[in-house]
Amino acid sequence: MKKYLAACFLLLGSTLVFAGGDRCNASAQECLDGMIEKFAHKGWMGVEINKNEQDQKVINKVIAGSPAEKAGIQVGDVLVALNGHNLGEKSEALENLYAEMKPGAVFTYTLANAGKQRQVKVTLAPIPDEVKAQWVGHHMMAQHHQNAVN
């Protein structure tokens, strides 16, 4: 299963690569500057997500004190919909919602667990500095260390 860190764009399986795609083509400094700028305006939910065999997004970790924890999201919950839009299908409506995921924004997630669905409202928070540092560090090691080796 592929593991995802979910900021606000969570779900979305976003790999947090500044230049997009699987390989970052920006210089290390350009990438760092871009990530800092991007993270300054993004909201954070505070979960880690895996995809299961059915390609559904499943919560595998809820960060203590996070907006997700406060909303009642639990490990094992399957993310079904965001503001009524099915997360299993790409759509322009979802892309527009992702663009609105800023600190203070409120989103309604439809979750499934044990055969039952429920909805929760999540108020996104700013991404904590320690989380930003972890994401930037991981990206720099994975992408720019490889660039230096080649």
Image: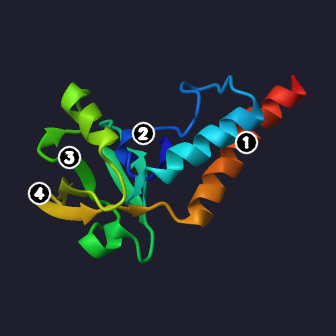
Whole-percent x and y of residue 94?
A: 24, 35
What residue is disc 3 on? 82
Q: Camera-side residue: 30 or 54?
A: 30
Q: Amino acid at mark 2?
A: Gly
User: Do the residues bearing badges 4 and 1 touch, measured as CB atoms within 8 Å?
Assistant: no
Residue in the image at 51% along x and 52% along y: 40
Specify the color scheme: rainbow
Q: CA distance from mark 4 to mark 1?
A: 39 Å
Q: CA distance from mark 4 to mark 3?
A: 13 Å
Q: Which mark is residue 87?
A: none
In the image, residue 3 above or below residue 126: above
What residue is disc 4 on? 117
Say what secondary structure mark 1 lies in: helix
**Callout 4: few (<14), some (14-19), or many (20+) C-alpha neighbours within 10 Å?**
few
User: Do the residues bearing badges 3 and 2 touch, measured as CB atoms within 8 Å?
Assistant: no
Q: Which mark is residue 140?
A: 1
Marked residue nearer the N-terminal end (3 or 1): 3
**Callout 3: few (<14), some (14-19), or many (20+) C-alpha neighbours within 10 Å?**
many
Which quadrant of the figure contains the C terminus? top right
Whole-percent x and y of residue 5?
A: 49, 51
Residue 28: quarter of image? top right
Marked residue nearer the N-terminal end (4 or 1): 4
